[in-house]
Structures are given as C-alpha cells and as structure tokens.
Image: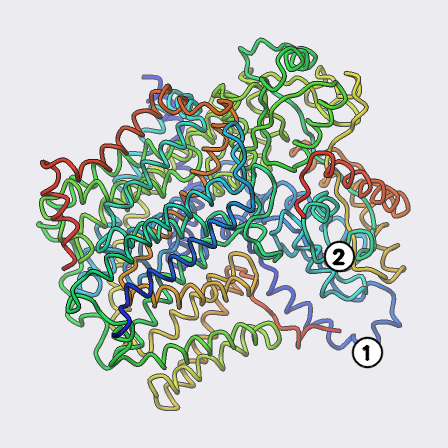
Amino acid sequence: MDVFNSLWLGLGVAMQPMNLLFCFAGVFIGTLIGVLPGIGPVAAMSLLLPITFNITPEAAIIMLAGIYYGSMYGGSTTSILVNIPGEAASVITCLDGYQMARNGRAGPALGMAAIGSFIAGTLAVVGLMLLAPTLARVAVKFGPAEYFSLMVLGLTILVWLSQGSIIKALIMACLGVVLGLVGIDSITAMPRLTFDQMQLIDGLGLVPIVMGLFGIAEILNNLEQRLDREVFQARVEGLMPTKEDWKRSAGPIARGSVLGFFLGILPGGGAVISSFLSYAMEKRLSKTPERFGKGAIEGVAGPETANNAAAGAGFIPLLTLGIPPNVVMALLLGAFIVHGVQPGPLMMTQNPQLFWGVVASMYIGNVMLLVLNMPLIGLWVQLLKVPYKILFPMILLFCVIGAYSVSNQVFDVYLMLGFGILGWLMKKYGYEPAPLVLAFVLGPMLENNLRKSMILSQGDFMMFLERPISAVCLACAVLLLVSPLLPIFNKQRKQLATEES
Amino acid sequence: MRPASTPLARRTLLGAALALPAIGSARAQAWPARPVTLIVPWPAGGSTDVSMRAMAEAAAKHLGQQVVVDNKPGAAGTLGGATMAATARPDGYTIAQMPISMFRLPYMQKTSFDPQKDFTYISNLTGYTFGVVVKKDSKFQTFKELIEAARAEPGKITYATPGAGTTLHITMEQIAAAAGVKWTQVPFKGGAETSAAVMGGHVSATADSTGWGPLVDAGELRLLCTWGGARTKKWPNVPTLTELGFPIVSDSPFGIAGPRNMNPVAVQKLDEAFRAAMQDKAVLDTLEKFDMAPRYMPTADYIKFVNETIAEQKVLIERLGLKTS
Amino acid sequence: MRLRADTFTALIALGISAFILLQGRELGLGRPNDPGSGFILFWTGIIMTGLSAVLLVQSLTAKAEDSSGLGDAFTGLRWGKVIYVVGLMVLHSAAMEYFGFVLSTAVLLLVLFKTVEPQTWRVAILGSALTTLGAWGVFVAWLGTQMPVGSLFLPD
C-alpha cells in the first residue's frame, strides 16, 4: 500500500496547475524537438535549463523530463516520412516505416508508433515505480564482461537484420566498427585514425553519419529518377491503423516494452540495442519474415515501443543511484543539482514530493503526448502530398542544420555530404547502411569493454564464461551463428536470406 | 552523440547590429564598447558550463557589457581555445575558458596551438573536487590500507577513472610512484560509469570528481581521501592527500585567456571583472553546488602557474608513456 | 570482359581491410592482460579481409547473367544531377562561414528550386524566401541553434 500512498502524494504534486502547465510545455517542446532531425533533447534541455532557475524544482524537472520522453515520441516521425532517423534508436524504424510511407501507409505507421510509445512509456513508469530500487542494484552488477557479451550478441543479431547479402552486411558492420574507433582511445589516450586532424579527436559524430547514409542518400537516389514520377504514393490508405495492423502489432508491442525496459536500465546504449533486438526478434518470430523491409508494421511497432520503454527505464539509475545512463540523463542530473537536489539513494526519503511528483507527472505527460500526437498524424501525412521537387530542397536544408547544430562545425556538414555520397553508391551495389550504423554505435562499446575485462581478469578469457549473465549472452550468440548449420533451422534461415530476390 | 547549442547566434547578431555604428570610434572609447564572447569548450548544461555562465553574468555586471557564452565542445576541451587562437582578434572581445587539457594535449599529440605562445592568460578561477571511493563493504577503511594492499600484491588493486590521461589517472599514478606501489588503472568512459563500476564490485576503488557524492552520503560508498588543498566543506572528516603524506594538490584548475598579444587594457579590465565575479554570491552558490572550490589568481600569478603547469605536464606525460609521436 | 560490380566493390573492401589491418598493427596489439589500441582494429581487419575474399570469389564464380556490371547501376539514371546537387551543398557550407546562414541558404534554395527541377520564378523566389525565413525563425530565433552569422558581418 506504501506505493499507492506515495503515488497519491506524487499525483497531488503533479496535478498542481503550475506543474501541469510545465508538464505540457515540456512534452509539447519535446514533440517538436523530436520531429526536427539532428536537434535532439540535449540541445533543447540545455537551452531551457537556465530558464528553469526561477521556477520550483518540481516544475523544472517535470518540464525537462517531459522534453526527453516527448522527443522520443516524435523521433520516429522523420524516419517514417523522409527516411531520416533523428537518433540511433530510430535507425531501425526507417527500414519498414519509410516503406510504409511510400506505400501510402504513413498514417498507420505514425499512429502505431505513437500508440506503441504510449503503452511502453506508461509501462516503464509503472516499472519505475514498483521495481526501481531493486533493479538499479541489479544493473550495477553488469560489469565490463557482461557488456562485452551483450555487445557480441547485439552484433551477431546484425546478421538477421540484413535484407540481402549477409557477406556484404558483415563487411558494412566491420566498416562501422572501424569508423566508431576513430578518435582518442579512452584506454590508452592514444589518437587513432585521426591523421593529426583536430576535428577527429572526439571521433566521428553519429548524427552526420546517420543523416548522410539515410537522409541524404535517399534524396540523391530519388533525384536520379525522373521526379515527375512521385516518390510517395498519392493515395493515402487511412490515417489510423486497421484491425489487421492491431493484430500484427499487439505481440511486438508487448515484447518490445519488456525488452526495452530491462535493457534501458543498463547505462549506455540500452535504447539502441533494444530497438534493433526487438526488430530482429519480430522478424525471427514472424510467420512471414519476407514482409520485413517492405513495410511490415511489426517492424515499426516493436522497435518504437522498445526504445520508448528504454527511455523511461533510463530514469531508474539516475533517480535511485545518481548515475546517469546517457547524455540526456547527465543533463537532467545537472538540473537536479542546480536546484539543490542530489539524485541518489536518499532522494526518495529526503525529497519524496519531488521524486513521486516527477514519476506521477510522467503518467500525465504520456496521456498528454498521445492526445497531442494523434491529431498531428493527419498534418504529417498532408506534408507528403507536397510535390517532391518542392520538398527535397527543404529536407536537404534540415539535414544541414541538423548536422551543423550538433557540434557547431561545418566539418560535420561535409562529413554528412560525404556519407551521403557513400550511401548513394552503397545502395547501387547492394550494401545496406543499417549494419554500419549499428556497428558504429556498438563496436566501440565492445572494444572498450573487452579491453577493460582483460585488464580486470589479467588476461583470462574464462571470465566471460564464468559469469552467468555473460555466459548466457555468449551462448545465445553462438546458437544464432551455428543455427544455419542445423537442418531444422536451415529452412527458416534460407527463407530469410532469399527474401530480397 | 555530441551535444551542444545555446541561444547565441541571435544575441551575437543583435550584438553585432548594435555594435556596428560604434566600430569607427571603438578604439578611442573605453574598453569594453561591445559584448564580450566567452568560449566554453564544454557542452551546454554541464557543471563547467553552468558555473562559467554564472561567472559570465557576474562579470558582465562589472564590465557594463554582456558576456556571451559560446559553447564549442570538442577535442577534450581544447577545440574552443584552438579555434580562438587561430581566428580571434586580440581585442579582448573574444576570450576562452582554459581547461587543463590545453596544457596536456600538446604533449600527447600534434595540436594546432602552443599553450606557451598562443594565449594571453587573464586569471585563474576555480577547480574541481576529486576523491577516491570504495564500496561500503570493502575491507579498506582508509587510503593507507588501500596503498598497503597495492604494495602487498602489485597490480592486483584496480581503480576506475573517467579515462586514460585524465587528471584522475595521472594523479593516481603520481601517488603510486610516491608510495612506491603498483596498481592497475581501468579507464571507463566518463564519470557515470565509474560509480557503477565500484558499486558493482568490478573494481577495488574509483578515482573521480564528485559524481559519487550522493552515494557517499547514502553510505553506499566510502570516501577515503579528497585531493584539494584543504578538506572539503561537505565531507570534513575525510583527509586530503597532503595530510596523508603526499604533497599533491590535484583539482584541474581552470581560468580564462585571450589570443596572444591581447590589448593590455582589456586584460586588466577582464581580470578585475572576474575577480569581482569570484566574490559574487550567486557564483559562489553555484560553485558550491558542484563542489568546486574558488581558486582565483590574478594575471601575474596565473601566468606563473600556467608556466609551471606546462612544465609539470610535460614531465608527467612522458613518465606515464602517454606520448604518441 | 566487363568488370563485375561485386568484383570491383570486393576489391575496394579488400584494400580498406588491408589499410585497417596495417593501422591496427602500427597502433600495437598489446598483451592479453592489456590489449592495445590496435587490437580490435587488427582483428576487424582480418575478419573483413576474409569476408571480402569470399565476396571476391563469389563474384568471379557467379554466372554472367546473374551478375551486374559496374556501370549498370548508372545507366538510364540522371547521376549528373546528384553530383551537381552535392557540389552545390559543398559550396553552400563553405559560403555559410563567410556570408552567413541566411544569405547563403536563400541563394542555395533559389538555385536548387530553379535548376534541378526548374520551377517558375514566382515559386522559386517565394519558396526560397519562405523556407529560409521559416528555418531561421524556428532553429535560430526560437530554438537558439548557433548557425554561422558569417565573418563578413562580424564587426572588426
């Protein structure tokens, strides 16, 4: 009953008119930020941080948190409409979401993404409320060895994501790992592959690479064709998901929520891994895997749900241990400190009205987001009716602004254009960008954790098998790799591999 | 993702528009005639950015002109200074925050700037609070015990840092050299991971800035020592390194500087303004929230300090073998 | 005999792998209890070499009618437009630092609207003016994105 008393206290705080107003302001700004590619919640939150100095800590944190989970709702919008993932977690949404839009089904795709996000967001808050202290303690048990094995599993799953040649997908993954390693090596502080260029010391930015390989490359591919033939099917088949869509999405949403929630608690990369693990899982479980990559709604519902659940779960290590699992949470930590509150084990007892107020506001915020996003779908679908020859210069411009705004360097715009050309050529020769981007994110984590594990175990490889979580991850990876050799799995595997032709 | 962005462009535009008619007579007039741009080489919203913004606001009151913060994160905090050295005029209207990496990176790899020649140092401002923590059920009650364990089994004691070549890494190795022991660094990526690593029992200890604060207050972690010149206000029972017999003060102090050959009038005015800022209540409150101790030094002292630091960094980097070329 | 597309890309991949491999070696493989900076680079290079070699063999042994030539991917397509647009974008980025975001963007959009899929002057001018203004309003004025002001307009 304790939890209910606390929630009651929290609702009392969250329902104060002032806090409701700031909650709405937060989710509203978050929605807009999420839709604009490149400009993420970090930029918006750091901009608004000084403004919150004059309001109560409750209102400030409620608004800033709203920006974060609000932006997760909007993140899928550009992926679906114009093939530009706003962040790494939305890369996977491009695969089927954009195809749905080209088939005139942007409405159901956007709708299902919003509904999935709502369900995941709400479930994550329930989980946060009931399990937070316990789970945070489990999460710190994840050491370098466990992370390494999880990354191995993640990279193995890339094979299941490829639509065409597996060899080519793996080559792209290798390239992604290498690109991810550019910059100062955090273990030895040695610059790698930087060729004495100052711009490369911090490594290549994810945003320019993703926007180049997906957004710019797609525009270039469309430009080559005759533009009088429209890119998007003019006939729009309904704005809302059909009964059939619901039936297909129910499973992916349920599985995505659970998967995302648990991976989201882990510091670093949880949202990204959960989104494509969910995609791979749905493709694997589907009776019709050949529909994936051609506009399967499961490929939108699962990953979008998973990354929202992960976003919600990300609050757990911050609120209960004071450990921010990602950049956004680090910023939120700064906001707490500026307001004189230290998130950590003591926060729940020292500042219960703040802790529970923020938690309760997330329920309210998620409802607001659903109400806010559903009418917007119609507006976004209308946008696709603008002729492509008018639309493409604008998309190009947004990409430039997005790439520039992350680092304030023109270098990143050149980088984006370079990857745009690369992506354009890659598509011509049957190489896919998704494995490259995911390996770019996971590769450095794999490297870093492998080396830390080796330092800690003093060179003993058995460490990975002796620790149970690590061993389970590795076993799953091995099973996935050898499964094509087993005759039972073989039939299914072939079906997956040949679906392109 | 590399974060950034603040409402600068608009204000710069506005500032530029307001300043334009004054250009002709600017040199004749008293400095400053227009807003000063302060480059902060860290992402907006972090502890360094927030404290620099508080100082900028306080200094602006004294200068009678706006001090506009421009975030240029990158290259381990050196991109801002490097850009300023390469492009800004030495008129005092562009200055930059100078983190310790400005004095360290040139010895680790090729850089486009030379900290000895390319800057006019103005004043030192403040530094961070660093300390070593262990898990609550760790057998180490004091820092001495940790060192003795490292002596008994060389290399067995592991400590997490937020990265190789950071002040944390370098100071821990300085301590080991002074005590004649050997322990093993495990570099994590950034501060958040180090607290989790020590809590999860993956390393014996963690050396980091005060991200561990709330966990120490909650009794989850035990603070063995802090690295400032004096004991901290928040944890007065915890000894400093000096008290433990290691004459080391390690707080990564930072100050401000302009491009080389800067207008001396501007240097003097800026030094005065930032000295006033370091006595401002709002600034001191902000610093305290982030556990940063004020460490103001006037221009002459700061230049001396910079020269010493540069020489010291060169030796340390070479001794630790962090040099690449 | 025409050059097969897969053969060509496999050769490029092989070249990149060799480069990665060498870079990895140069950075140092380290020891088992402390793998060096080049450890993963080196092994990634090895794996990529193997993969590229397999691709190369596959491409050479595939039946002629199943494989496409290097140039096939360009025939019948207006790839000149792609080069033209990317060139304009590069110019725009370079110009942005001197002429500022607003001016260079307005010109870029005008040229894009007018030349890639020629619009009427009315549409082109209106489109570029409104888009530039809208983008500036939302990103710079409202969200505070720091787009270049242009060194041309900065006071001395």
Front position in the image: B17 or A155: A155
Secondary element type, mark 1 = helix
Residue C126 drawn at (x, y percent)? 41, 83
Asked if residue A317 lies left or right of residue A308, the reply is right
Q: Residue at x 33, y 54 (%)?
A: C52
Query: How many circles with numbers are drawn on the protein?
Result: 2
Question: Which mark, residue B87?
Answer: none
Q: Which residue is mark 2?
A: B95
Q: Residue at x 42, y 27 (%)?
A: A145
Nearer mark to the viewer, of 2 and 1: 2
Residue A324 drawn at (x, y percent)? 49, 34
What's the chain of the residue with tag 2? B
What's the chain of the residue with tag 1? B
The answer to whether marks 2 and 1 sit on the same chain is yes
Earlier-in-chain disc, 2 versus 1: 1
Q: Is residue A44 visible?
A: yes
Q: Residue at x 54, y 52 (%)?
A: A193
Quadrant for the C terminus of chain A, please.
bottom left
Quadrant for the N terminus of chain A, please.
top left
Q: Is residue A192 above or below residue A487?
A: below
Disc 2: CA contacts within 10 A as few (<14), some (14-19) or many (>=20): many
Q: Is residue B232 above or below residue A201?
A: above
Callout 1 amino acid:
Gly
Front position in the image: A438 or A323: A438
Callout 2 amino acid:
Ile
Q: Is residue A244 above or below residue A423?
A: above
Question: Which mark, residue B24?
Answer: 1
Front position in the image: B104 or C41: C41
Disc 1: CA contacts within 10 A as few (<14), some (14-19) or many (>=20): few
Q: How is the image coloured?
A: rainbow
